[in-house]
Amino acid sequence: MAEKACWEYQGDPERPALLVQFANGRIQTPENIKFTLYKNNANEERILRAKTKRLSYVGKNFTPEALNSSSLCRYYVGVRNKETGKMQVFDAEQYSMQPIIEKSSTEDRPVKDTSEPEYKSYREKIDALIEAFGTNKQKRALSSRKMNKVETAIITQEVTKAADEIIEKRGTEDLLQEVVSRKEELWYSPFLPQCYASAKTQEDVYKFDELISPEEYAVLENVAAAFKNITPEELQEKVDKQEYSSYVLKELQDIKHAKDIDRQARALWYIELLMKICQSKTLKRKELFALGCPGIIVSKIMKNFTANTIKNEIVLNRITSTMKCKIMSHVVALALHVSDFSVDLTLLQRDLKLRETRVLEIAKAMRLRISSRYVFNTISSSERHKFGALELPLPIYKPNFGNRRKK
């Protein structure tokens, strides 16, 4: 009587056993074969690679032959236990392994094509897998990256070509000097007035027409008339009441000796306005109109020297610390034209209520030559003041970022 046998299904269709068949015959030493399986979980495509000492093989489950075979039948593998007589059955997937014929290294070897490297990088191998198994999204990303790589190479080639033409046309020394000049200007704040470092005269380094435009200069005639026609008695009254800043009062004492009294008066009126708004935390248009500002001046002040913030759904025009520095730099630039290009920085610093270190930083950024000297006050005593002078050629101050102490 034959022994009874029974079988039980233990398979998992998502993890089938792999049945391989080599197209060129039987492998003599199957224990020495190294198998590697690559799979794409999104569409169940798989590639099986086998490597021996002599040849490499590859099999795919998504070739036309494999798809026809799998659609007609299903494969199983049974493992029978001789002692119990039971057999466990597993799902299986068949692969037809085709040999990969590598080119020989003999004298018949063709000329090496540099466009396809013999050894692929890790990135290139991953790209090949994405092309074979990747999702549509991954394939689109790969195609986009390759296009960007081509465009970058074209741009680099064009930039290199243009650079060679510029170097040939202008010369290396000229370009190096331009690079040095640009590096020197990089650390200067964009809030400073426009500086023309290559100007031939002091007047053109910080142009007066850019600090006060011709339109603004024209409307200042009426408001600056009080400065232009001030009498000694009126000036003394202003000094006693401290109605104006110390710098403006000092310059008004000598305004009658100025080369252009009208221009001096308008510049001093504008400086006094900037000093007053520098003391505010927020600024409103009606406050400027109350000071007698013409409309064009009000618009410029609100646009260039205030920062917009929102508080309780209300837009506020604030005088931030950055804007205070911007105001200070414009005051210094105008004061240079008023004071024959040498300005008392200590006096301006006290009027604007800023720290001395901040004022000196601004003066150095504006490329003024800093000096110290004693100044006598009204009670026959003297104190040391910092002065900033505009001298040609302009001095160069390198940024000192690394010397600050850590707190």
Image (cartoon, helix red, strand yellow):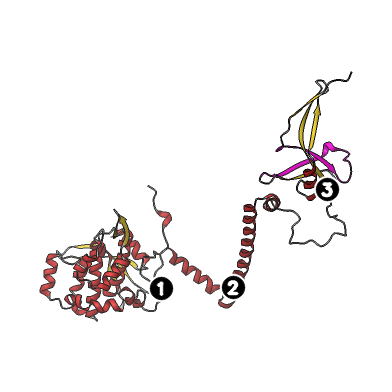
Q: Residues within 10 Å of mark 1 (few under 14, many from 20)?
A: some
Residue 100 screen position, x and y as percent: 82, 50
* Residue 360 located within the stretch drawn in magenta: no
Can you identify the residue that label 2 sits on?
A: 162
- If you read the primary sequence from the N terminus, does the residue marked by circle 3 or circle 1 appear first? 3
Q: Position of residue 151 (x, y in %)?
A: 62, 65
Is any part of residue 371 visible from this angle?
no
Query: Mark 3 sits on what residue?
Result: 98
Q: Residue furthest top?
A: 1
Task: Give the numbered dot on residue 197.
Answer: 1
Which residue is at a point 76% across and 55% down the rendered structure image? 118
Q: Position of residue 352 (x, y in %)?
A: 25, 62
Label 2 Cα neighbours within 10 Å, binned few <14 / some 14-19 / many ≥20: few
Q: Secondary structure at mark 2?
A: helix
Residue 143 visible in image: yes
Image position of 214 (left or right of 146): left
Q: In the image, what residue type sits under mark 2?
A: Ala
Separation (CA) of disc 2 from disc 1: 28 Å
Q: Quadrant of residue 194?
A: bottom left
Report, in whole angstroms, how far the alpha carbon at label 3 lies from the one at label 1.
Answer: 75 Å
**2 vs 1, front mark:** 2
Q: Amino acid at mark 1?
A: Ala
Mark sitting earlier along the chain (2/3):
3
Residue 15 falls within the magenta-colored stretch: yes
Bounds of the magenta span?
12-41
**What kind of residue is marked 3?**
Gln
Dividing the picture into quadrants, the one containing residue 393 is: bottom left
Position of residue 259 relative to residue 237, above or below, is: below
